[in-house]
Image (cartoon, rainbow, N blue to C red):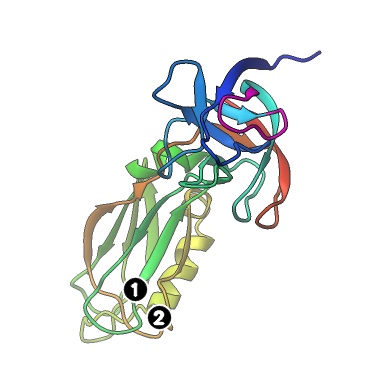
Amino acid sequence: MDDRFIRGFKADGGTTEVPQYRAVVHSTSEGYVELPAAAGQKAAGITETNSARDGGHISVITKGRAKAEIASAVSQGDQLRANGTTGKLEKAAATLETSMTGANNDIALTAKGEWQGKDGALITLTLVDPSANSQSLAVTVSGFAISASLATDGSGDITTTASELIAAINAHATAGQMVTAALKGTDTGAGVVTALSATNLSGGFGAFCTAMVDGAADTEIIDVEVN
């Protein structure tokens, strides 16, 4: 049984085709759709029919199972949004990149799974200086709040490196389900991290469908569920 909702529109693409398997947004002309002009624009749905130029008729799946072209690798269950220019799909994941004093000590968090989309921006990261000697690194989670009490030496100085912090977050039973921690940019992870007050991830807007299977690379066409 086909439980999809499909609507007919006209393509508002000028001399640019509105391709098949792409996310489209409503244009300023009633009854027309076009490729998005910015990442995360509210999508009307995913084009089902062959490419159409300006004024050409085009069918758009507004709810239910569809095939869509991806802009980068995605995993089953990822919340997806429209890429800012092509209409291909990409992860709608909130992120955080730290900017700590020192070198090679910054990390990047990316919301994952059910925490992607708008809920990812509710996640916070706090790094706590325990202000005590010979403490061990400990990660805890309460609701949307991920907190790490940092390790110290016999003098009370923080010893946790970025690499150690990343490993601890990813290994935590709950935090590891909420985010993926990685090194920021070209940092090596050898530097010692610093205390950080509660800081939210940001972004993660524009999710309108869910990846039903893994997708490996740009231009792959996968099954998605339009919400």
Q: Amino acid at mark 1?
A: Asp
Name the spot of residue 178 as percent of width and height, x first.
48, 48
Quadrant of image for the C terminus: top right
Side of 21 relative to 135 (left or right): right
The answer to whether residue 161 is seen in the rendering is: yes
Q: Nearer the viewer, residue 188 or 215?
A: 215
Label 2 packing within 10 angstroms: few (<14), some (14-19), many (20+): some
Residue denoted by label 2: 187
Q: Nearer the viewer, residue 97 or 143?
A: 97
Q: Are marks 1 and 2 in contact (CB under 8 Å)?
A: yes
Count how many numbered circles sit on residues in the image. 2
Residue denoted by label 1: 106
Name the spot of residue 144 as percent of width and height, x first.
36, 43
Q: Residue furthest front?
A: 15
Q: Amino acid at mark 2?
A: Asp
Task: Using the image, determine if residue 200 lies above or below residue 63.
Answer: below
Q: Residue furthest right?
A: 1
Q: Secondary structure at mark 2?
A: loop
Examine the structure image and report whether residue 28 is included in the region drawn in magenta: no
The answer to whether residue 213 is seen in the rendering is: no
Side of 153 relative to 40 (left or right): left
Q: Which residues are magenta?
A: 48-58
Name the spot of residue 157 as percent of width and height, x first.
22, 82
Q: Nearer the viewer, residue 182 or 203?
A: 203
